[in-house]
Image: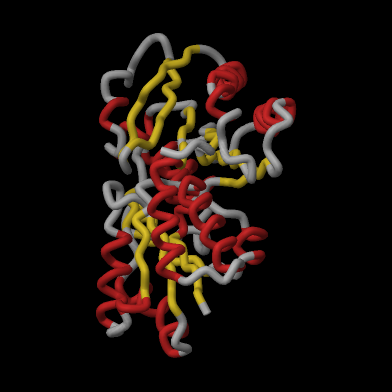
Amino acid sequence: MIKIITDSTSDLSEDILKKYDIDTLPLYIHLGEHEYKDKLEISPEDIFFWSEKNNSTPKTSAPSIEDAMNAIRPYAEAGDDILMFAISEDMSTTANVMRMAAQELDYEDHVYIIDSANLSTGIGHLIVEAAHMIQKKMPVEEIVTSIEQLKPRVRSSFVVDTLKYLHRGGRCSATSSLVGSLLKLKPRIVVKGGKMDADRKYRGNLDKVIIQYVTDMKEELLHAKKDRVFITHSGCDKKIVDSVKDYLKSLGYFHSIIETRAGSVISSHCGPGTLGVLFIDGREI
């Protein structure tokens, strides 16, 4: 058997996790002296309330080695191969924690760590692809090779309503020059080579900006892998999310349009009102 374990930043819905029998290894969120497990012990709304009250952004950290060992142990005892997906190593030490946990259990030959070089449902795309390969009975080594080849084709981007969270967290240096702008810019943040960068700037109300962001991607979307496209957000107004869904449906292209909600770790860095459309480029590189 091949088991998939993902860290909690993949932002996959409970339905998808259950459908493919995927386990989740939570990262941690630190609010002052208090520590919480992502997805399990705190919500994005709790984080936004705390952040505004304290004029600060929470700290986040990787799972402990003990947590990772506990996630691996039952499958090691069963003799299973394990695929573990982690947020980009340029953003977190989670992948390395997974490696050390496998070594501590003397099971590293059967634990395959995938540094996604991505975040949120950018990781989620890779996980779902791997789950389909498992269903096709592909050997684990072939699955790992195929996923590594897919990684550069994942397209992850999002628009933020406020720059405060990204700036405070220091995860996207390109936003520093935009903070305090009288133009109230809303940048498009993209993931490139495992890092975040701001590659386009929008101005105006969030609802109009989001639609402009999505329509600007039309050509890319029409060259995407048709299986699925994710809309992932940190708590946007339903009308905004529905308008994105309607646009994607109007393309008549994707087999599945999936909405997911960003968890507490991703939300703590991007802030409320963030929305992204994530897909896999269907063209070979």
| Badge count | 0
Residue sitting at 52 percent across and 60 percent down? 130
- The type of colouring in the image is secondary structure
Q: Quadrant of residue 146?
A: bottom left
Say if 110 sits above or below 273 in the image.
Answer: below
- Find residue 246 and report its horizontal and vertical position in percent: 73, 28
Left or right, residue 117 beside residue 153: left
Residue sitting at 47 percent across and 29 percent down? 160
Residue placed most toward the observer, 252 or 272: 252
Residue sitting at 38 percent across and 54 percent down? 148
Q: Is residue 234 visible?
A: yes
Q: Is residue 53 visible?
A: no
Say if 91 sits above or below 77 in the image.
Answer: above
Residue sitting at 27 percent across and 47 percent down? 90
- Find residue 64 and report its horizontal and vertical position in percent: 32, 69
Residue placed most toward the observer, 130 or 4: 130
- Find residue 95 and report its horizontal and vertical position in percent: 31, 61
Residue placed most toward the observer, 134 or 47: 134
- Find residue 168 and report its horizontal and vertical position in percent: 31, 35
Left or right, residue 257 beside residue 176: right
Name the outermost residue toward the bottom: 77
Q: Quadrant of the C terminus?
A: top left
